[in-house]
Image (cartoon, helix red, strand yellow):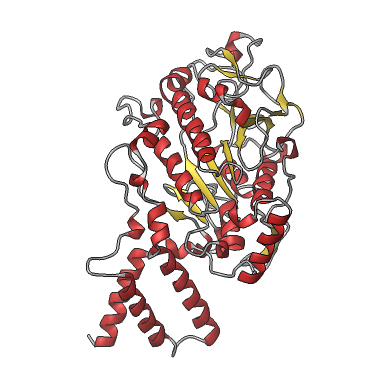
Amino acid sequence: MSNKSRVCQEFRQTVDQDRRALLRLGMLGAGGLTLSQLLQFDERSAQAGRIPDRERSVIILWMRGGPSQHDQWDPKPDAPVEIRGEFAPISTSVPGIQISEMQPKCAAIMDKWSIVRSLHHRKEDGNVGHSNGDQICFTGYPAGPSSDVNVMPSVGSHVARQQQHMNPSMPAYVMVPRHVPGTGSAWFGPAYGAFETIADPAADGPFKVPNFEMATGLSPDRIRQRQQLLSSLNRSSLSDVQMAAADKFQDKALDIVTSGAARQAFDLDAEPRSVRERYGFMPAFDPGDPQRCGSPNWAQRMLLSRRLVEAGVRLVTVDLRWWDFHKEGFDSQRRGFLPRFDQAYTALIEDLEQHGLLEKTLVVAWGEIGRTPRINANAGRDHWPYVFSAAFAGGGVQGGRVVGSSDRQGGVPKDNPKLPHDVLATIYRHLGVDATQQYVDSSGRPHPVLPQGKAIDELF
């Protein structure tokens, strides 16, 4: 093998390892703004008393499976027992608002967060289940032939495309730990997919993101030298336009993989033990029934999201699965899901506030569907797309509010109905993403970022 071929092969192997997920990132300038324009917009925002868009972030706490509206945020104490369930409502710090007794910490800081109780899926979308619900909630468009595969770019991919240039040293879009249905980039291509941590923040032991691990004996400078050499070897086979795009993309990926700021942000072990304990350490799965305990790493995933937005990540989606209680639902929620969410969610809100990030960071906790009003024969609740709830905090949200309501059985919206598209519109507005922008798919058809939806003003 010639020296030229050997260098090319070695470079490709090394960089492919280190930037496997990073190649999904958007390129500098993809949003069409120069640095001087960006600074001008920031100055105007500051003069108007508004937080500049480039300082804003979103954390999506994705409660995949469909949390029960009755058992968490929309109790029905006056309904028959086969509907109201086993949990009693408790008062919160805001008079007139009650939530489940399984959320006492959330109740104590109700003034810092709010609830939307009238979310629902459109009738034309049919009997929405998990994966097609995922697609609608992350893209605003119905699922395609395979509901696990995106046919339209996700909210995070739009954020990456329009806003990656705002903080070149950090990925704009991060999944903790990895993609779930609905979060893909579709025909935008891998450049606008999420940076996946792959590694899962664990209760004990070091947390290391594999995409930051370099091969033995390599340094950032040596990787860049190889990149430059490979670029020079490729120029004979690529046009000037193609070469410029490839150079810019490789530079972006390597900026992140070799960035000290990025490495520091993902260094969860740098957090004080007291902070990690406030979020909570969760035991491993119940070997008899994993559903009863849920993920052992929820809380630490949520803590990592705070570190990431603090470092300038625009959108972090945290996988909090699996809220799918078809059987023994009350036992599962009592023993694991609700107390753990109660502890970690309140820790996140308080942690963001202590770090001066709560006004800048919109936190949305929700799932793709709700649960049936009537309890089934297995002490669980089944899929129900006709009404569900979501929690909102930070990002200018006024705490202590309830938007919309469900009927007396918690089966359909009673007033002020909201769609998942409205949640997406709220996220886009907070970040400053142009939701009316149209992009052309691989077949040449234009599509708006969001086909419908209006930001939920009542929260603000």
Q: Is residue 247 left or right of residue 434?
A: left
Q: Is residue 220 left or right of residue 47?
A: left
Q: Nearer the viewer, residue 66 or 309?
A: 309
Residue in the picture at 32% in, 51% down: 208
Q: Residue furthest front?
A: 47
Percent position of residue 103, x then y: 52, 22
Percent position of residue 109, x then y: 57, 26
Q: Nearer the viewer, residue 451 or 243?
A: 243
Percent position of residue 305, x then y: 47, 45
Q: Quadrant of residue 384?
A: top right
Q: Is residue 135 above or below residue 334?
A: below
Q: Residue furthest right?
A: 415
Percent position of residue 132, x then y: 58, 43
Q: Is residue 458 above or below residue 107?
A: below
Q: Nearer the viewer, residue 47 or 51?
A: 47
Quarter the C terminus occupies: top right
Residue in the picture at 49% in, 63% down: 25
Residue in the picture at 73% in, 28% down: 404
